[in-house]
């Protein structure tokens, strides 16, 4: 698997965050995020840094709080405590629209596409371009085509075909393309490869890498360790609402990650520095 | 990676990249064809894949015409064909009203009696002792209907009630209101000439040619300019030869309609010319096609019918759009009601809004509108309305009873949805 050789010259994430020179502010930073639902403590004091141009994998067992955490970032849930910083500035995300206004887009697991509409119509749903109150189909079609080709999504026969006639991987590609159409800076993906075959998973993971190369921040939730180690630059592991480990992917291997997911700690982590978050 | 995995990879990759995979999928023919023969091939591929489009209803019309013509040679005479279109106008308009709510996956059972209210309000206001001008009466009637739709739509969306129940209450309630307004006489006659002309008057023969030429020219110009502009900017566009076919078909249809309408169909005095009501139906068809196809409102109605949750997440206001759809449906029902009243030159307590609305839903479904939402167009309603009117008219010519008419209409309705459902079985389309 990967080796830990390159990690020595990297500064500790947390210390870098503490200094935080304005120019080097990370795209998104969570500090002490806490969320309760009644008696259930869903998230406890979560600190997370999501840099631009990198893929951050968010992993954890069922009920670890992954979905709650991304919903806090997407503006659907409101944290009870803690602060979210966007490009170094503290922000309050009250609605999904607030998040979208900052450039945060979410690709949901069920994709949220309308089968009866075509690719262009789905990509612009809710944000149609108009001219004299009529829909400006030509303008939208050109933008959609440009975005799809910039992401090298070329397998669709026609961007005017209904989404119902697309394969699972193509549908995922359309959902991702819709998220980046709006000059978004952070794309959150919930299990993007969960229902896909081998080749389609390949296509979607390539797409995820391309987003990072374009300088976008990407948060990807996945249960599939192959995918995580293939696509992610960084990993953040949740266990029962605590962020138990985070760092460059090269500091981890599969066994370590599984240990963290299952028990909240690992004896096998390659780096010798102290664990990122209190395990005691 | 194991040998098995390798095999799987190759297979999936072929599926992903191979064009063969898509030939069976219901991709609209004009998207993948660059010449007329290619278009025809794509169209047949689509047909085999279950996207039958307008074919069943057109074939059905042909069969109905052949059957009734063999039974009674009067069926295909100019006089009867025009009569059939005028009779069918109310069904077509009411069916276009239903399309708005059917697209959402809802239903409006009250449309028939909302139409009745529209007719009654209009008749009351043009009475000699009220004395409103015809246009004010029409506007008021349509306004009342729109408010009724707004009211029902608000109840349905704000309280989350099923439209079936709310509009069933509307069916009962507005029947009561209509009977109350008509009062003891049982009939409310209309004296206003313009209102009566709406469904009964014709353009002169010359005016028919001029108006139809204008409509066809406008259609051709819009079609040609749009397709040419799309081809020029390299967008998805049909081949030029197909645009020519569309334009030729429009010109042909216009000429045939005017030729039929301009034949003398009078019994005592000569009657000729295109009936006003055909132009009214064409106008409503054009307006609603534009609203549903080219505006945000229309796009959102389709989106909600296809996947309401996706529309909600995209920021579409579901209650707002649903309410407007119910309002537009009742508004359109109001137009149908005024045409109904105009044709009878009166509104009476005999107006059967229950049967009317069920015929309207049947017409929309026969034309190809889905009851589950997300699929259908105003033109479906018009074609379905013609089918219903043709059955009604043809069986009337043969002297069949109302009982037989109902039974035959039922059989056609079941046949239409069965053909649609069988054709779609096994395709990737989910509805």
Image (spheres, coloured by chain):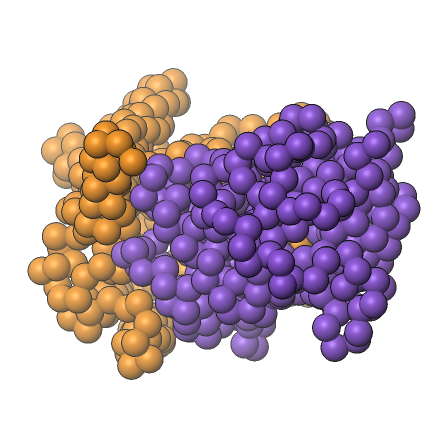
Chain colours: A purple, B orange
Q: Is residue B315 left or right of residue B369?
A: right
The answer to whether one can see residue B180 in this image is no
- Which residue is at a point 32% across and 72% down the rendered structure image? B235
Q: In which quarter of the image is the C terminus of chain A?
A: top right
Q: Is residue B224 left or right of residue A24?
A: left
Total numbered badges shown on the rendered structure: 0
- Say above or below: B317 vs B296: above
Q: Is residue B166 left or right of residue B40?
A: right
Q: Position of residue A89 (x, y in %)?
A: 82, 68
- Which residue is at a point 27% across and 60% down the rendered structure image? B31
Out of B191 and B240, give the one closest to the viewer. B240
Residue farthest along the left direction in this orientation: B37
Q: Where is residue A98 in the image (x, y as percent from the top left)?
A: 76, 60
Out of B136 and B291, give the one closest to the viewer. B291
- Say above or below: B93 vs A259: below
Quarter of the image holding residue B163? Answer: top right
Q: Quadrant of the N terminus of chain A?
A: top left
Q: In this view, does B176 lie to the left or right of B370?
A: right
- Which residue is at a point 67% across and 32% down the rendered structure image? A266
- Which residue is at a point 29% across and 81% down the rendered structure image? B232
Quarter of the image holding residue B417? Answer: top left
Q: Where is residue A27 in the image (x, y as percent from the top left)?
A: 70, 65
């Amino acid at each position: 698997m990967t080796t830990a050789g390159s990690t020595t010259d990297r500064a500790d994430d947390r210390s870098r965050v503490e200094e935080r020179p304005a120019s080097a502010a990370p795209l998104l930073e969570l500090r002490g995020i806490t969320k309760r639902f009644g008696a259930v403590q869903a998230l406890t004091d979560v600190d997370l840094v999501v840099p631009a141009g990198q893929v951050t994998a968010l992993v954890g067992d069922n009920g670890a709080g992954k979905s709650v955490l991304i919903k806090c970032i997407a503006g659907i849930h409101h944290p009870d405590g803690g602060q979210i910083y966007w490009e170094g500035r503290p922000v309050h995300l009250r609605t999904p629209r607030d998040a979208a206004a900052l450039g945060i887009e979410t690709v949901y697991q069920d994709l949220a596409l309308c089968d009866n509409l075509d690719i262009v119509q789905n990509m612009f749903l809710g944000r149609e371009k108009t001219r004299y109150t009529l829909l400006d189909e030509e303008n939208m079609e050109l933008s959609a085509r440009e975005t799809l080709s910039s992401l090298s999504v070329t397998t669709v026969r026609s961007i005017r075909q209904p989404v119902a006639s697309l394969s699972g991987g193509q549908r995922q590609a359309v959902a991702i393309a819709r998220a980046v159409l709006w000059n978004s800076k952070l794309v959150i993906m919930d299990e993007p490869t969960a229902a896909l075959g081998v080749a389609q998973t390949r296509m979607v993971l390539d797409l995820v890498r391309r987003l990072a190369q374009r300088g976008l921040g990407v948060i990807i939730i996945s249960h599939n360790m192959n995918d995580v180690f293939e696509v992610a630059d960084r990993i953040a592991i949740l266990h029962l609402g605590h962020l138990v480990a985070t760092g460059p992917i090269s500091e981890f291997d599969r066994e370590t990650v599984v240990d963290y997911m299952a028990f909240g700690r690992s004896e096998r982590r390659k780096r010798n520095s102290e664990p990122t978050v209190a395990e005691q | 990676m194991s040998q098995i995995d390798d095999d799987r990879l190759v297979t999936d990759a072929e599926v992903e990249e191979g064009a063969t995979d898509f030939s069976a999928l219901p991709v609209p023919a004009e998207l993948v064809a660059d010449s007329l023969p290619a278009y025809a091939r794509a169209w047949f591929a689509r047909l085999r894949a279950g996207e039958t489009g307008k074919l069943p209803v057109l074939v059905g019309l042909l069969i109905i015409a052949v059957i009734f013509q063999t039974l009674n040679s009067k069926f295909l005479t100019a006089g009867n064909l025009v009569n059939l279109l005028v009779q069918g106008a109310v069904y077509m308009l009411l069916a276009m009203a239903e399309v708005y709510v059917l697209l959402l996956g809802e239903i409006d059972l009250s449309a028939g009696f909302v139409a009745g209210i529209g007719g009654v309000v209009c008749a009351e206001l043009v009475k000699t002792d009220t004395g409103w001008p015809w246009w004010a009466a029409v506007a008021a009637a349509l306004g009342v209907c729109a408010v009724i739709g707004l009211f029902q739509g608000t109840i349905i969306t704000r309280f989350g009630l099923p439209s079936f129940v709310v509009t069933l209450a509307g069916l009962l309630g507005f029947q009561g209101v209509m009977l109350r307004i008509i009062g003891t006489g049982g009939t409310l006659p209309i004296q206003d000439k313009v209102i009566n002309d709406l469904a009964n008057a014709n353009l002169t023969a010359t005016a028919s040619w001029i108006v139809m030429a204008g409509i066809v020219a406008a259609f051709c110009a819009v079609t040609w300019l749009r397709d040419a502009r799309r081809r020029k900017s390299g967008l998805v566009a049909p081949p030029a030869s197909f645009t020519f076919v569309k334009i030729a078909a429009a010109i042909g249809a216009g000429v045939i309609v005017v030729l039929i309408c301009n034949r003398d169909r009078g019994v005592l005095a000569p009657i000729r010319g295109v009936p006003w009501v055909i132009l009214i139906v064409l106008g409503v068809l054009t307006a609603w096609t534009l609203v549903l196809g080219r505006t945000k409102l229309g796009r959102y109605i389709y989106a909600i019918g296809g996947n309401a949750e996706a529309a909600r997440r995209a920021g579409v206001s579901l209650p707002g759009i649903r309410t407007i759809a119910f309002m537009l449906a009742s508004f359109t029902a109001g137009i149908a009601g005024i045409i109904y009243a105009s044709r009878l030159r009166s509104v009476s307590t005999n107006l059967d809004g229950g049967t009317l609305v069920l015929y309207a839903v049947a017409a929309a479904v026969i034309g190809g509108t889905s009851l589950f939402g997300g699929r259908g167009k105003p033109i479906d309603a018009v074609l379905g309305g013609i089918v219903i009117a043709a059955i009604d008219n043809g069986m009337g010519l043969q002297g069949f009873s109302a009982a037989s008419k109902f039974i035959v209409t039922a059989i056609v309705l079941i046949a239409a949805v069965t053909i649609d459902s069988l054709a779609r079985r096994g395709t990737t389309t989910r509805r």
